[in-house]
Image (cartoon, grey):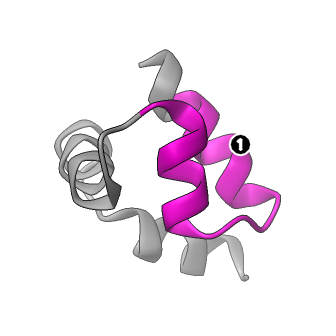
Amino acid sequence: MRRLDLVRHLLAQGQSLVDAAMTAGFTDQSHMTRQFRSTYGMPPSRWVKMLGR
């Protein structure tokens, strides 16, 4: 959950999905996306769009 919180923070600041995944310590973007979708019920790209970015 801490890594996903960091990912949400980084994405809200405008970082790319790849950069956010690597900074948070995920193996790759797809690993982060699977965890994000499992936890929050939507992919991170949709979450970013909901923020209006």
Left or right of 31, for residue 21? right
Percent x, y for residue 2? 51, 17
Q: Is 7 located above or below residue 41 in the figure?
A: above
Residue name at image x 18 percent, y 50 percent: 34
Residue name at image x 57 percent, y 81 percent: 49
Left or right of 38, for residue 39? right
Number of marks drawn: 1
Percent x, y for residue 6? 62, 32
- Does residue 1 show up magenta in the picture? no
Residue picked out by circle 1: 9
Magenta span: predominant SS is: helix
Residue name at image x 23 percent, y 40 percent: 35
Q: Nearer the viewer, residue 50 or 48?
A: 48
Residue name at image x 49 percent, y 64 percent: 18
Quarter holding the N terminus? top left
Furthest residue toward top:
2
Q: Is 36 located above or below residue 45 in the figure?
A: above
Q: Nearer the viewer, residue 28 or 15?
A: 28
- Dot 1 crowding, Cα within 10 Å, few <14, some 14–19, many 20+: few
- Does residue 20 show up magenta in the picture? yes
Q: Is 19 located above or below residue 10 in the figure?
A: below
Percent x, y for residue 48? 58, 71
Furthest residue toward right:
13
Left or right of 50, for residue 1? left
The span shown in magenta is 5-25
User: What secondary structure is found at the residue carrying circle 1?
Assistant: helix
Quarter holding the C terminus? bottom right
Question: What's the amino acid at mark 1?
Answer: His
Percent x, y for residue 32? 32, 47
